[in-house]
């Protein structure tokens, strides 16, 4: 079948990389090598340091970058990742929590259970050629990986297999799990995965996100969010004798005017944005159907009040236009992230152990060319790791991640790993241009080393895990988890289907031509 084309090509590379060879040298810089590294950790780091490992997982990341599949349409990306785990000896369950592309790969048995999160979805409208420093789409209007998610589940999968190497060699008790998490760009998998009980027995979780630096932090971050579609039903009539009709599009427009006035009266922690999904098909037919998709973001405490006021804007719009407001469709609803300090401190220790990758002249030259095009400082790629990031106190908005739900059911912290050019813009062609190629391969490999080393610490140091668990239990005792997601919400499997069906053949054709 056509969709198996790239995975099949990759299989020989994978087999080569996944078979257990004797450990090579540490792969760390000589300065770092002076630090005493536990033998279990060393085994995992050695496995990840092998050039064939770096290259095999680099190829997986690039393949997912090329697939550029939107949320809940990630059939190829999910299969490639799940197959890779299965070939390495993991037990893989697929199609979980009502999502065909959600999977969990498990290795080992008993306690402790350490979870690794991994995302793999793309964003619409961002198609861009690899490592080209000017805007140049592969297929105009098609999706692209503008947030580096192609490298993220890849980092988690490679880290998990490295941990397995150490578990096998030293007969370590415990379980390592990879949570293949679809649709993060529409924040739509983790609330459903939590609801399905997938994290029930998990003692601690390591999340990762690709970025510009090797870094981590703790505390509260991002925004809680309702992602909801508001639809209105009106009556058609001739556009030139519109008194017989009731326009659903008018309702959408009035709702948007009302929410835009609402902004003035919201605390500045809010963020709110929308797109019109449906607004009629011709000016001479009054639209009897229209809908608008909103992201309503605020702090955990302020979200519900703000959401209710947005719903009131929709009700007012229906009343004003004589249309009917349809039941609100909640796509997803999530909390802010509450990252565990003990876990972040553990990640930080391993960040300092692993250090930054050595970038090639070519990688730096591309970074500088992209920075020049974006009119930002031409610094190239960073060479030092970051210090541990304390929480922000300002609560003035920002993005959201559905990892927030996981942070409230298991102690979790997120690792940022490098590869993306500093100054490139997330959710923009410039990020797509640089989340592929050798710099990203090295960056995701450095990330995988930190994840694997930290997971091994959690498996082998019960006092470390207890400290992290105690902090989590104390937090949850005061802030018990109560989902924002309505009980009747279902994963939006249909949301990106039409877009993906439109662009997939065009993207496949472009990939074929490139070969
Ligand atoms: Zn992202």
Image: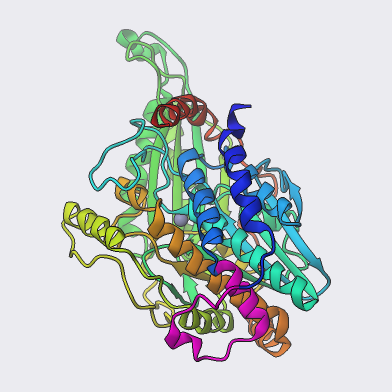
Residue 43: in magenta span = yes
One can see residue 49 in this view:
yes
**Is 476 left, or right, of 272 in this rendering?**
right
One can see residue 307 in this view:
no
Q: Examine the image and state in which quarter residue 132 appears.
A: top left
Residue 432: in magenta span = no
Quarter of the image with the N terminus in it: top right
Q: 430 above or below 420? A: above
Q: 77 above or below 175? A: above
Residue 462 place in picture, x, y as percent: 73, 86
Q: Examine the image and state in which quarter residue 144 appears.
A: top left
**Is 85 left, or right, of 74 in this rendering?**
right
Residue shown at the point (39%, 78%) measured from the top left: 385
Segment colored magenta: 24-48
Tell me how the rendering is colored. rainbow
Residue 333 place in picture, x, y as percent: 57, 53
**Is 38 left, or right, of 106 in this rendering?**
left
Residue 154 place in picture, x, y as percent: 56, 56
Please state which of residues 248 and 389 is positioned toward the viewer in this rendering.
Answer: 389
Quarter of the image with the C terminus in it: top left
Please state which of residues 341 and 416 is positioned toward the viewer in this rendering.
Answer: 416
Badge count? 0
Residue 293 place in picture, x, y as percent: 46, 39
**Is 380 left, or right, of 328 in this rendering?**
left
Please state which of residues 403 and 137 is positioned toward the viewer in this rendering.
Answer: 137
- Residue lying at the far right in this picture: please name it: 110
Residue shown at the point (41%, 70%) measured from the top left: 357
Q: Examine the image and state in which quarter residue 275 appears.
A: top left
């Amino acid at each position: 079948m056509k969709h198996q084309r790239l995975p099949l090509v990759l299989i020989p590379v994978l087999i080569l990389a996944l078979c257990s060879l004797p450990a090579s040298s540490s792969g760390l810089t000589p300065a770092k090598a002076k630090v005493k590294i536990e033998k279990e950790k060393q085994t995992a780091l050695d496995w990840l340091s092998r050039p064939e490992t770096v290259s095999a997982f680099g190829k997986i990341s690039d393949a997912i970058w090329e697939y550029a599949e939107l949320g809940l349409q990630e059939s190829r990306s999910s299969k490639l990742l799940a197959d890779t785990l299965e070939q390495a000896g993991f037990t893989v369950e697929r199609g979980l929590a009502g999502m065909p592309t959600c999977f969990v790969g498990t290795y080992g048995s008993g306690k402790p259970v350490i979870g690794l999160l991994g995302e793999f979805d793309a964003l619409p409208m961002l198609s861009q050629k690899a490592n080209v420093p000017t805007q140049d789409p592969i297929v105009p209007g098609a999706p692209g990986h503008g947030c580096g998610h192609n490298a993220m589940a890849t980092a988690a999968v490679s880290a998990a297999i490295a941990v397995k190497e150490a578990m096998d060699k030293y007969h370590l008790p415990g379980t390592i799990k990879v949570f293949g998490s679809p649709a993060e760009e529409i924040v739509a998998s983790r609330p459903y995965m939590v609801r399905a009980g997938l994290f029930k027995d998990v003692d601690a979780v390591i999340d990762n996100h690709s970025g510009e630096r090797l870094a981590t932090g703790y505390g509260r971050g991002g925004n809680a969010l309702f992602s909801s579609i508001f639809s209105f039903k009106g009556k058609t009539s001739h556009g030139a004798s519109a008194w017989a009709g009731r326009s659903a599009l008018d309702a959408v427009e009035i709702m948007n005017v009302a929410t835009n006035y609402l902004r003035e009266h919201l605390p500045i922690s809010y963020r709110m944005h929308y797109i019109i999904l449906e607004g009629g098909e011709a000016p001479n037919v009054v639209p009897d159907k229209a809908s608008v998709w909103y992201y309503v973001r605020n702090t955990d405490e302020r979200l519900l009040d703000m959401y209710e006021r947005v719903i009131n804007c929709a009700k007012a719009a229906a009343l004003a236009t004589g249309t009917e407001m349809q039941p609100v469709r909640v796509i997803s609803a999530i909390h802010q992230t509450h990252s565990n300090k003990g876990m972040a401190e553990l990640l930080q220790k391993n960040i300092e152990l692993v250090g930054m990758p050595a970038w090639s002249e070519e990688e730096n030259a591309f970074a500088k060319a992209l920075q020049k095009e974006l009119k930002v400082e031409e610094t190239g790629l960073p060479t030092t790791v970051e210090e541990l990031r304390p929480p922000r106190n300002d609560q003035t908005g920002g993005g959201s991640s559905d990892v927030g739900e996981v942070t409230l059911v298991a102690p979790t912290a997120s690792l940022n790993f490098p590869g993306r050019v500093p100054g490139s813009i997330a959710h923009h062609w410039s990020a797509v241009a640089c989340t592929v190629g050798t710099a990203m391969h090295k960056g995701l490999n450095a990330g995988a080393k930190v994840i694997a080393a930290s997971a091994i610490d959690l498996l082998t140091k019960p006092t470390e895990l207890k400290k992290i668990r105690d902090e989590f239990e104390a937090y949850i005792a005061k802030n018990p988890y109560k989902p924002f997601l309505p009980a009747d919400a279902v994963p939006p499997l249909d949301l990106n289907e039409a877009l993906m069906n439109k662009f997939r053949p065009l993207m496949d054709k472009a990939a074929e031509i490139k070969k």
